[in-house]
Image (spheres, rainbow, N blue to C red):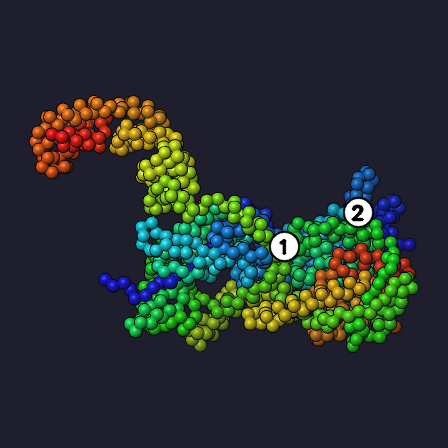
């Protein structure tokens, strides 16, 4: 059996026992990427040499009997939204095409300290804004289960590379569903931790109060392994939770006894495709067969989730992305062309009178305008405009502050629900992966992709997505579990229980390689 | 000359850099004067992915200041982003406090030792913490070269203190600034150096014009910027009041007729000039910074800050006047020179046992020598015990003030104690019987003077003093005069 077919946990055992070297493992995944990624497009950049060099050093240290990190020799792919010292971090945006971070994100530093082999940078929707990875400024990523379909997003490359066996583990980020939705659409396991469980330092911000970094893997056990390396308090992130992270990988195999699952009435309404509903209900039946009780519950405000999300997230984004102005770093417009443009306008305005000249942009304002107009893609600009509007004087009460109220109500819904149930179970998406290009001209339809996932971000709670079946056309269908704050352990154990009883997560796509 | 038919109404916004080692949200140094952009890190230059972490020390200093300004302290306060585009603002927003400042509703007492206005309380609307922006250095010929940005200052903690429009003259505004600076210096929270930008003042000013028909009309409010000294603030306000009165006479514009104008002070021409003000810059789109946790302040914490404040200038003045019976003017002079001089004075007063005499010597002789020798009080060679020793001798009549000054200067130059200097100068107390004998001799030798005194020309007694001093420079002039008058009276 090829090394790329192993789970991360299995591969780690091979490495630890010396049956496989880090170089062999890294080589195997590099070969896989080189053969298959031209079809999938999961990686924005991958550089075999430094990865192999890192693997070689780990093998040497192992030979010398040195103490090695938790993930020693395991290749890990990182979403191109986390900074890594001395390397480009593009956020799949032209704006940061040549941005080289002078520091490591805390998560990257922890991966390095754990001796993970950083194998490459995965594709995403520009600045993580999107649900299909079609908003990347650089390339499309295809779903390994059907290359005509999107892999989901924004962590599309992160999910696709695990599904295509190009990396055993990968790091994604989730602001409104960006780990769970692509994990579901690619048939892998993805966990969005509680807000604050994983440090955001070095994660290029989209919406700061919603962003979380999390693991994408094949199994709950693998996700537990990666989460325990990246989770924990970070003094560099004031919003990080000051509590030690549990050893998830030690407990993940313990089944949960007396589990009560909540089935949300509002999740089974209009828009949910019947194949997805059937798969979800069958998964619930599996849990019942494992001894779980199921209760119907209500999250009455969840129907306002998407609306509130698309006020709060763009508002924060409009602020977070203000720094990309062409002055300090990143993309800057062609200044000569800009000056020429202004000079021509000045000549035209001069004949129209002093007022026309007065109303012209200053060179500085024009530099901002052109740099931002050229450097950002359409969806990013759409959200900046949305957010700027929602925060403007006279509108922020109606939009931003109202959305914050809805957010509190959604959190209260969850608090109440978790008084009755241990976990909430339901779909991740209304349908399996759609065709590339299907929704690019319909932003609203694209936003509704987040219907079942945004609430967890608004409430700050954790959620996990994993495969629970396949559509008639052979595309994966995902199941979502959500837990009270800081109960990642419960999510992982419940997921593991299911994966012990089923084999959906073991299926691999055949895309020709 | 008539008083102008208007009152000048002034409110001040003061930005104070707090004396922290490091910036408000990162670990960079706040030292002034380093080469451009050497005191920066990914956080304060706003690199993607970086996050702010609040400097606790800055918050403590701010809290201390607010408590000393008699402010209410909010039990819950948060950080907001104030958004605008400018090259010296690397994140595109400034982390500040908008609707829930950590302190509000305080006051600062101002008075004038010369009595030019009645003592009053100037209300403090709010004091909040925020980060400073960087500095832009613009090319003089626009378009000829690039502007340069220095981000060393970006992220330095600033306390913004906003007063009520409670001041009624440029003089009161200057007094407010003096009082505020003194308070901040006493608290040790800022060095208040205006040249280095650690204290910056913007003024809001308008007039209440008394119309001939007995109405009071407020004129439009103008904000003045670019004033780089307290003196400049006073001059700018005086200029602006005059200018606004002229505009009012010409146009009759009242408050609300025109939008608020911003004018810059030109220190060379001594005028204010309208600044270009773009309408669109006014919407800062404030919202809570999601990267920073709100700060809660417990009542006990405020109490602890209060009890650790120490004596503030107003309390000190009061104590000096009560305990040592010195004039408000003198207490003002001593207290306004800072805590070190107060401590010096207190020690001299205690050791000499005469607070009034100590005050005279400290406010006149010590301050004069400090100024001439360009010394700070803690560098002054004559320490309180030595000065107190001298004052005791003056008080006992061992030497008069004039000779005392001679001794004082010698002590200062030689470092010798008072007794030694007096011995060298041959100053010794003349005993009473010798003094009486001398006076009897003088009275007997000067019948003409005696006759003058008897006829009521008391000033003639001064001539006895002069003669006595010639015979023995150590005599106490006051005592000579007294004895002579007494002898003549008995004749």
Q: CA distance from mark 1 to mark 2?
A: 27 Å
Residue at mark 1: B51
Would you say A131 lies left or right of B443 here?
A: right
User: Against B440, is A26 above or below?
Assistant: below
Q: Are marks 1 and 2 in contact (CB under 8 Å)?
A: no
Query: Local crowd at mark 2 within 10 Å, few (<14), some, or many (≥20)?
Result: some
User: Against A83, is A448 above or below?
Assistant: below
Q: Give how far across and how far down residue B5 sits, in percent.
A: 30, 66
Q: Give how far across and how far down residue B180 sits, in percent.
A: 43, 51
- Splitting the image into 4 quarters, where does residue B464 fall? top left
Residue at mark 2: A70
User: Against B233, is A276 above or below?
Assistant: below
Task: Look at the image and tell me whether residue B160 can be seen.
Answer: no
Q: Give how far across and how far down residue A93 sits, in percent.
A: 66, 63
Task: Look at the image and tell me whether residue B434 can be seen.
Answer: yes
Q: How many numbered marks, from 0 up?
A: 2
């Amino acid at each position: 059996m090829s090394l790329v077919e192993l789970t991360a946990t299995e591969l780690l055992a091979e490495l630890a026992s010396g049956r496989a070297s880090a170089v062999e493992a890294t080589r195997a995944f590099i070969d896989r990427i080189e053969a298959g990624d031209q079809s999938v497009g999961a990686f924005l950049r991958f550089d075999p040499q430094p990865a192999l060099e890192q693997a070689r050093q780990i093998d040497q240290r192992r030979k010398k009997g040195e103490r090695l990190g938790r993930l020693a020799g395991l290749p890990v792919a990182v979403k191109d939204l986390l900074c890594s010292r001395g390397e480009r971090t593009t956020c799949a945006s032209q704006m940061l095409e040549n941005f080289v971070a002078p520091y490591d994100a805390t998560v990257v530093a922890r991966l390095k300290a754990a001796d993970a082999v950083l194998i490459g940078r995965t594709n995403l929707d520009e600045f993580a804004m999107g649900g299909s990875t079609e908003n990347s400024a650089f390339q499309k990523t295809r779903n390994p289960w059907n290359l005509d379909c999107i892999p989901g997003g924004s962590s599309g490359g992160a999910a696709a590379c695990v599904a295509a066996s190009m990396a055993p583990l990968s790091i994604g980020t989730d602001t409104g569903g960006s780990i769970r939705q692509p994990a579901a659409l690619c048939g892998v396991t993805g966990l969005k931790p509680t807000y604050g469980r994983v440090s955001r330092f070095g994660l290029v911000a989209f919406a700061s109060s919603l962003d979380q970094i999390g693991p994408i893997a094949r199994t709950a056990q693998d996700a537990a392994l990666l989460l325990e390396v990246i989770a924990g308090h970070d003094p560099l992130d004031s919003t990080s939770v000051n509590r030690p992270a549990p050893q998830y990988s030690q407990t993940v195999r313990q089944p949960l006894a007396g589990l009560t699952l909540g089935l949300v009435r509002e999740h089974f309404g209009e828009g949910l495709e019947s194949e997805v509903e059937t798969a979800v209900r069958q998964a619930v039946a599996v849990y019942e067969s494992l001894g779980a009780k199921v209760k119907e519950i209500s999250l009455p405000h969840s129907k306002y989730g998407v609306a509130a999300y698309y006020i709060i997230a763009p508002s924060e984004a409009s602020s977070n992305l203000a720094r990309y102005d062409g002055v300090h770093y990143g993309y800057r417009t062609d200044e000569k062309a800009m000056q020429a443009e202004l000079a021509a306008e000045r000549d035209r305005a001069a004949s129209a009178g002093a007022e026309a000249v007065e109303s012209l942009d200053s060179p500085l304002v024009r530099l901002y305008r052109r740099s931002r107009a050229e450097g950002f893609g359409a969806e990013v600009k759409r959200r900046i405009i949305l957010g700027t509007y929602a925060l403007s004087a006279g509108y922020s009460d109606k939009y931003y502050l109202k959305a914050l109220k809805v957010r509190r109500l959604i959190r209260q819904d969850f608090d109440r629900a978790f008084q009755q149930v241990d976990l909430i179970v339901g779909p991740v998406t209304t349908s399996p992966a759609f065709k590339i290009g299907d929704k690019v001209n319909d932003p609203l339809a694209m936003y509704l992709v987040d219907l079942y996932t945004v609430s967890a971000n608004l409430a700050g709670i954790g959620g996990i997505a994993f495969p629970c079946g396949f559509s008639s056309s052979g595309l994966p269908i995902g199941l979502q579990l959500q837990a009270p704050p800081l109960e990642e352990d419960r999510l992982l154990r419940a997921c593991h229980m299911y994966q012990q009883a089923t084999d959906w997560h073991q299926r691999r796509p055949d895309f020709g390689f | 000359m008539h008083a102008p038919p208007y009152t000048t109404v002034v409110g001040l916004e003061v930005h104070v850099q707090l004396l922290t080692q490091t910036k408000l949200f990162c670990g960079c140094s706040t030292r002034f004067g380093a080469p451009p952009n050497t005191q920066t890190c990914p956080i304060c230059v706003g690199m993607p992915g970086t996050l702010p972490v609040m400097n606790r020390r800055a918050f403590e200093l701010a809290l201390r200041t607010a408590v000393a300004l008699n402010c209410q302290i909010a039990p819950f306060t948060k950080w907001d982003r104030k958004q605008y585009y400018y090259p010296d603002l690397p994140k595109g927003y400034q982390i500040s406090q908008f609707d829930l400042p950590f302190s509000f509703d305080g006051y600062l007492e101002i008075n004038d030792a010369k009595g030019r206005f009645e003592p009053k309380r100037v209300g403090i609307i709010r004091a909040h913490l925020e980060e400073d922006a960087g500095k832009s250095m613009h090319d003089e010929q626009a378009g000829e070269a690039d502007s340069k940005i220095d981000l060393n200052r970006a992220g330095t903690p600033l306390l913004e203190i906003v007063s009520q429009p409670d001041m009624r003259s440029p003089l009161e505004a200057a007094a407010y600034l003096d009082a505020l600076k003194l308070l901040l210096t006493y608290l040790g929270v800022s060095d208040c150096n205006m040249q280095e930008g650690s204290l910056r003042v913007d003024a809001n000013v308008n007039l209440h014009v008394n119309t001939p028909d007995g109405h009071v009309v407020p004129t439009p409010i103008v904000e003045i910027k670019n004033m780089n000294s307290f003196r400049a603030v006073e001059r700018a306000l005086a200029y602006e009041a005059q200018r606004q009165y002229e505009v009012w006479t010409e146009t009759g514009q009242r408050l609300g007729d025109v939008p608020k104008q911003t004018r810059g002070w030109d220190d060379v021409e001594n005028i204010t000039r309208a600044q270009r003000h773009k309408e669109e810059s006014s919407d800062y789109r404030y919202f809570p910074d999601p990267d920073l946790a709100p700060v809660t302040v417990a009542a006990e914490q405020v109490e602890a800050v209060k009890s650790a404040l120490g004596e503030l200038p107003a309390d000190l003045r009061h104590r000096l006047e009560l305990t040592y019976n010195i004039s408000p003017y003198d207490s003002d002079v001593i207290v306004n020179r800072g805590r070190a001089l107060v401590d010096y004075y207190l020690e001299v007063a205690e050791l000499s046992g005469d607070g009034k005499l100590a005050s005279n010597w400290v406010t006149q002789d010590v301050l004069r020598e400090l100024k001439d020798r360009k010394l700070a009080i803690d560098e002054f060679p004559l320490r309180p015990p030595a000065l107190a020793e001298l004052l005791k001798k003056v008080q006992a009549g061992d030497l008069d003030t004039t000779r005392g000054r001679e001794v004082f200067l010698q002590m200062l130059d030689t470092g010798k104690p008072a007794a030694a200097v007096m011995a060298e100068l041959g100053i010794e107390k003349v005993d009473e019987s010798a003094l009486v004998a001398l006076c009897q001799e003088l009275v007997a030798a000067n019948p003409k003077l005696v006759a003058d005194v008897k006829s009521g020309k008391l000033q003639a007694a001064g001539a006895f003093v002069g003669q006595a001093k010639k015979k023995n420079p150590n005599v106490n002039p006051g005592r000579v005069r007294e004895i002579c008058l007494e002898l003549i009276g008995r004749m």
